[in-house]
Image (spheres, rainbow, N blue to C red):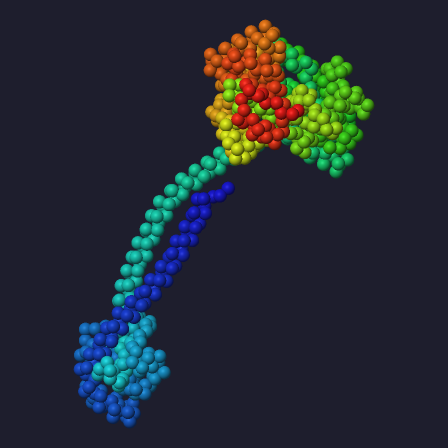
């Protein structure tokens, strides 16, 4: 996790240190430059005054003094007079010493008599002044001989200044002036210290303000991180665990079995997979409702957990189906004891809702490496063994035998083929047009799942859809159907043929609709396909509305908020109730084809259809009639005010390209004149 406060503190400390170093260095440079400019300007002014007022009197002496040695030069009366003049000129100033150089670098005069007659022509300051350019430097002296005697601990500015009567005159000598700037430097240091302290105070205050801001931001980031981490953990848990029992789901089970298989292969150990299915559990749901059934499943899950070791995995992979992974089994006898323990635990009476429920289970067992060497096949063989146990009356366990009934093997193979078909993208969608019975326009499509077999024919959905629910394939299969249908709808809309009015109907199984997180999945599909949510119609049957779970209600509410429309399919064939139409956000009713068959001659069907359409119109619900196959049925439904219809009279379900061609071919026709009947 990014530690904002820690990195801010480190960065601030480094920045403050760097700022202090840079400001200190800059101040030192500016201070020295100020001292040089200030002291040099004073010394230059003094030298110019000397050049105008004093030097003309001694210029002749300077010319004749070239031949005098040092001692003779010091004894010259002119030197004493020059000393008095210099003292008068520098009185009440910070000047410590004055020297006058001849052009050859010999010191003609100095307030320090010991230096008269000596030569210093190699000094860089003297050379610069000799060329007409003043030059100054600063030095620190422990002792310095000044006009007033020896001084200790002085900071001295030395300026070499050319002597000439006028600016355009040639240089006649060089004057060196030593000025005491100790107090001036100390003053600058005090000012610099005050400035530095002020800057530090400002930076500290700014750091304090930013510290509280960053600490608050860091707290927000930490909270967001923790929240995001919890959300990710919850999402991982949701995607790998069953919502009802909190057991691992098929995804997590497969991962753990694969890991156990790798360990078993390395250590040459035994691994078993037990497939547990409750006997006649559907009777509990039908007689007592899904809520009691769910409580029973939760109790069974807890009891199974007490029968196995911590290293074992129990997963719920279907409605009343559990799979137990048992790695590192020492012997088959140990496994048989565990299986017997599970049967006894399930058979113990379950008290719920004031009732005592008695259950039994059938358990199928397969071994690695005896029966299979991969996870899917092991579960498949255990499932086949479980089916065999059921055929023998249930309430028993059965070991997989290679020559089990062909029927059981075919069932397991079909389930395996369905999983592989989804992975290999073998399923396809066909689309049956939905017709506006008043205008004759194609206003939508119903996506219908198709699965071609190896012989080029189609497997009936009635054969493989129930199997997909049983083996846990229904959720990923439904997600694939939704994604493909929404993407196809957007493709038609972007084709440039003005098909923005089309809607897409997709069937959802009751088991999938009860899955937590369905709203998030469908919203993600809609967002990816970039379609209007109102163009998607989810078709549900009324059978699972009898005892809705919290997940079903939450999914209804969430999807309705997202703008998705609901259709109650096969209305009239199940537990149809007006209460559902009031309690759930149903906008369309689909009349089952069994009631359309025989219209208009079948009086019972005609009465039922007339009542349904009248009721729907009074509740402001749209009605879709399924299975229209004759012009007489069409005419009867139009007279009753049925809004929409679909059936072989208009078109069989078609591949996407053929559906688009049909829409474009008949977009301007009216079905009252020419029903849509493409070639079959």
Front one among 498 and 512: 498
Residue 457: in sight, yes or no?
Answer: yes
Residue positioned most to the front: 673
**Residue displayed at 57% across by 8% down:** 606
Determine which quarter of the picture holds residue 129: bottom left
Is residue 615 placed above or below 132 in the rendered structure? Answer: above
**Residue displayed at 38% across by 42% down:** 213
Is residue 309 placed above or below 636 in the rendered structure? Answer: below
Determine which quarter of the picture holds residue 343: top right
Determine which quarter of the picture holds residue 331: top right
**Residue displayed at 17% across by 82% down:** 53
Residue 529: in sight, yes or no?
Answer: no
Is residue 374 placed above or below 193 in the rendered structure? Answer: above
Q: Is residue 172 left or right of residue 674?
A: left
Indicate the position of residue 71 as horizontal and vertical percent values.
28, 90
Front one among 59 and 96: 59
């Amino acid at each position: 996790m990014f530690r904002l406060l820690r990195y801010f503190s480190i960065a601030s400390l480094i920045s403050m240190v760097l700022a202090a170093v840079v400001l200190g260095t800059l101040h030192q440079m500016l201070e020295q430059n100020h001292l040089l400019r200030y002291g040099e300007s004073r010394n230059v002014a003094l030298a110019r005054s000397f050049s105008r007022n004093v030097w003309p009197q001694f210029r002749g002496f300077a010319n004749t003094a070239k031949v005098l040695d040092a001692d003779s030069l010091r004894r010259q009366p002119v030197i004493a007079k020059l000393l008095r003049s210099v003292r008068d000129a520098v009185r009440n100033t910070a000047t410590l010493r004055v020297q006058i150089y001849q052009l050859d670098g010999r010191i003609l005069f100095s307030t320090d008599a010991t230096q008269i007659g000596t030569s210093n022509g190699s000094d860089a300051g003297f050379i610069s002044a000799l060329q007409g350019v003043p030059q100054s430097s600063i030095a620190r002296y422990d002792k310095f001989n000044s006009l007033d005697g020896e001084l200790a601990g002085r900071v001295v500015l030395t300026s070499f200044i050319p002597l000439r009567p006028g600016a355009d005159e040639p240089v006649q000598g060089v004057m060196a002036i030593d000025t005491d700037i100790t107090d001036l430097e100390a003053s600058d240091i005090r000012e610099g210290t005050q400035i530095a302290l002020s800057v530090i105070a400002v930076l500290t205050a700014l750091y304090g303000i930013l510290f509280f801001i960053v600490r608050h931001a860091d707290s927000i980031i930490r909270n967001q991180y923790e929240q995001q981490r919890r959300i990710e953990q919850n999402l991982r848990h949701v995607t790998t665990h069953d919502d009802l029992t909190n057991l691992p789901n098929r995804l997590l089970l497969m991962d753990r079995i694969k890991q156990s298989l790798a360990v078993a292969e390395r250590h040459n150990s035994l691994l078993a997979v037990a497939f547990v299915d409750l006997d006649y559990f559907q009777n509990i749901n039908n007689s007592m409702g899904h809520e009691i059934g769910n409580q029973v499943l939760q109790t069974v899950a807890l009891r199974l957990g007490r029968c196995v070791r911590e290293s074992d995995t129990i997963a719920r992979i279907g409605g009343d189906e559990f799979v137990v992974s048992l790695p590192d089994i020492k012997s088959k006898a140990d496994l048989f004891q565990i299986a017997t323990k599970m049967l006894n635990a399930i058979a113990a009476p379950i008290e719920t809702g004031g009732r005592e429920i008695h259950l039994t289970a059938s358990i199928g067992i397969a071994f690695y490496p005896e029966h299979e060497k991969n996870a899917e096949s092991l579960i498949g063989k255990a499932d086949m063994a479980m089916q065999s146990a059921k055929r023998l009356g249930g309430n028993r366990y059965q070991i997989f035998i290679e020559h089990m009934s062909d029927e059981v093997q075919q069932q397991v193979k079909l389930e395996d083929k369905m999983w592989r078909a989804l992975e290999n993208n073998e399923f396809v969608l066909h689309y049956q047009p939905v017709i506006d019975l008043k205008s004759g326009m194609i206003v939508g499509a119903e996506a219908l799942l198709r699965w071609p077999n190896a012989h080029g024919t189609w497997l009936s959905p009635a054969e493989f859809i129930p199997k997909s629910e049983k083996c846990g394939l229904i959720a990923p299969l439904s997600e694939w159907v939704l994604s493909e249908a929404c993407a196809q709808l957007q493709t038609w809309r972007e084709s440039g043929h003005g098909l923005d009015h089309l809607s897409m109907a997709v069937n959802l199984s009751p088991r999938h609709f009860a899955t937590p997180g369905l709203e998030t999945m469908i919203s993600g599909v809609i967002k990816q396909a970039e379609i209007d949510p109102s163009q998607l119609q989810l078709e549900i049957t009324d059978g699972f509305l009898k005892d809705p779970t919290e997940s079903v209600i939450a999914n209804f509410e969430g999807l309705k908020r997202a703008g998705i429309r609901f259709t109650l399919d096969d209305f009239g064939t199940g537990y149809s109730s007006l209460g559902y139409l009031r309690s759930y956000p149903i906008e369309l009713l689909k009349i089952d084809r069994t009631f359309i068959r025989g219209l208009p001659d079948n009086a019972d069907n005609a009465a039922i259809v007339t009542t349904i359409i009248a009721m729907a119109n009074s509740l402001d619900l749209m009605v879709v009639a399924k299975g229209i196959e004759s012009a007489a049925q069409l005419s009867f439904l139009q007279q009753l005010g049925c809004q929409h219809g679909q059936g072989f009279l208009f078109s069989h379900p078609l591949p996407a390209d053929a559906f688009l061609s049909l829409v474009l071919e008949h977009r301007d026709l009216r079905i009252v004149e020419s029903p849509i009947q493409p070639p079959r």
